[in-house]
């Protein structure tokens, strides 16, 4: 009995050591780039919305090697050669990886040792069918616009929407059927989070297995769901306070009592700025009827910001922390594109979002 007990304890210890060794094991990334002899190679991955370097080496004779890579779950990594001369995207996992690439034919990429990457490539090959169809329609739309063919343009818009819906259905089906896949949770976070209704997105997240829920992409997905919950119609818009061009702090809550367009834009962003003339007309039309615009400007340069305000004759409230895309306000409201806006009622509750100037005018005309 004692011998049996000792054997069981020994087995447990050996098994625990084996798992611990696998968990703490270092992995290699080796690479060979045909047609590129030497240069600096930076290994990076996305953290908090930014590409963050993990390690760097110098490539000689077209070869490079990264040692001592620690990783728990599969993650998308990037190899950046000489500040972007070559960028290689691949899924790293708990294995030694061999990467073979050709500088002259950048599409010819081989990643050995990562089943996750192979799965990701297979998904992309199926998804590109929809993207190719969309690209063709874009070309046809440009031609129709140049010919002022409104009838064809309307038809192409309809076709584009149908293809987009087919693509969303394909991605959703893939993610739901492969709920034990780290590629699936990555796709759910990076693609579906902006395309599905909140309830659908929550169902997708709940469908993942426990092992997949340990992924950084699952946490990312949950964070996006949390943002969607607090910024959906009917919710109180999260309060914040930022400085205007003169340094005076203005809080969102201080504008309660008025209908407010909370507009996220930037002076350096072409589409954002192109809307200013139309917003000017709307502001002049409704500002005397208890309407205000609070524009959160994701600025890099304060002087440039001031110049644009003066040039575009902007009279509504503009605020910024001059942190551009590093601003905390981006996380608070889950801003992933510019411009983005929310229309708030007199109590600061969200009643609509992402309104074009034309649609905003229609809504304000109705409620004011």
Image (cartoon, rainbow, N blue to C red):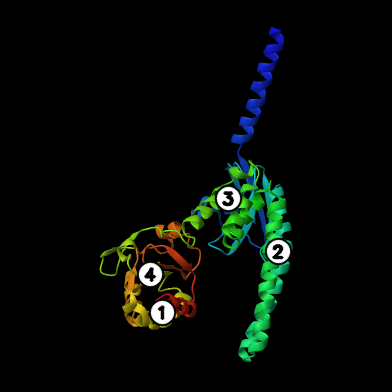
Dot 1 or dot 2: first in sequence order is 2
**Residue drawn at point x = 50 percent, y = 67 percent:** 337
Q: CA distance from mark 3 to mark 2?
A: 20 Å
- Residue hosting label 1: 279
**Residue drawn at point x = 35 percent, y = 69 percent:** 301
Mark nearest the camera among 4 and 2 is: 4
Q: Quarter of the image holding residue 249?
A: bottom left
Sort mark 2 into few (<14), some (14-19) or many (20+) by Cα contacts within 10 Å. Answer: some
Sort mark 4 into few (<14), some (14-19) or many (20+) by Cα contacts within 10 Å. Answer: many
Dot 4 or dot 2: first in sequence order is 2
180 or 79: nearer the eye? 180
Sort mark 1 into few (<14), some (14-19) or many (20+) by Cα contacts within 10 Å. Answer: many
- Residue hosting label 4: 260
Q: Quarter of the image holding residue 28?
A: top right
Dot 3 or dot 4: first in sequence order is 3
Q: CA distance from mark 4 to mark 2?
A: 40 Å
Dot 3 or dot 1: first in sequence order is 3
User: Which quadrant: the N terminus?
Assistant: top right
Position of residue 169 measured from the top left corner of the image (x, y, whole percent): 69, 62
> Tag 1's secondary structure?
helix
Q: CA distance from mark 1 to mark 4?
A: 13 Å
> Tag 3's secondary structure?
helix
Q: Taking 352 as reference, is 41 left or right?
A: right
Dot 3 or dot 2: first in sequence order is 2
Position of residue 305 measured from the top left corner of the image (x, y, whole percent): 35, 73
- Residue hosting label 3: 217
Q: Quarter of the image holding residue 285?
A: bottom left
> Tag 2's secondary structure?
helix
Q: Taking 201 as reference, is 3 left or right?
A: right
> Tag 4's secondary structure?
strand
Q: Which mark is residue 127?
A: 2
């Amino acid at each position: 009995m004692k011998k049996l007990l000792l054997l069981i304890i020994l087995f447990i210890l050996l098994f625990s050591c084996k798992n611990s060794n696998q968990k703490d094991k270092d992995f290699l990334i080796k690479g060979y780039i045909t047609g590129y002899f030497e240069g600096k190679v930076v290994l990076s991955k996305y953290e908090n919305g930014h590409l963050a370097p993990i390690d760097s080496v110098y490539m000689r004779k077209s070869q490079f090697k990264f040692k001592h890579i620690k990783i728990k779950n599969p993650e998308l990594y990037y190899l950046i050669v000489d500040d972007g001369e070559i960028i290689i995207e691949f899924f790293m996992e708990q294995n030694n990886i061999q990467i073979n690439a050709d500088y002259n034919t950048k599409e010819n990429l081989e990643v050995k040792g990562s089943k996750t990457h192979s799965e990701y490539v297979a998904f992309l090959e199926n998804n590109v069918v929809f993207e190719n169809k969309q690209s063709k329609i874009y070309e046809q739309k440009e031609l129709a616009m140049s010919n002022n063919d409104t009838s064809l343009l309307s038809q192409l818009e309809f076709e584009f929407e149908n293809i987009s819906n087919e693509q969303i259905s394909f991605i959703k089906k893939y993610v739901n059927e492969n709920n034990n896949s780290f590629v699936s949770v990555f796709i759910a976070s990076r693609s579906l989070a902006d395309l599905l209704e909140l309830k659908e997105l929550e169902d997708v997240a709940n469908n993942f297995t426990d092992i997949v829920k340990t992924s950084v992409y699952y946490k990312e997905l949950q964070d996006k769901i949390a943002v969607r919950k607090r910024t959906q119609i009917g919710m109180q818009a999260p309060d914040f306070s930022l400085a205007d061009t003169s340094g005076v702090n203005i809080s969102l809550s201080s504008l309660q009592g008025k209908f407010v367009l909370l507009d996220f834009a930037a002076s350096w962003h072409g589409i954002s700025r192109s809307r200013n003339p139309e917003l000017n007309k709307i502001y002049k039309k409704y500002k005397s009827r208890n309407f205000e615009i609070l524009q959160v400007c994701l600025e890099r340069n304060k002087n440039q910001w001031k110049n644009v305000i003066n040039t575009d004759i902007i009279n509504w409230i503009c605020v910024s922390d001059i942190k551009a895309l590093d601003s905390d306000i981006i996380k608070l409201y889950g801003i992933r594109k510019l411009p983005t806006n929310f229309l708030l009622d007199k109590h600061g509750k969200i009643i609509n979002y992402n309104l074009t100037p034309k649609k905003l005018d229609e809504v304000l005309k109705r409620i004011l």
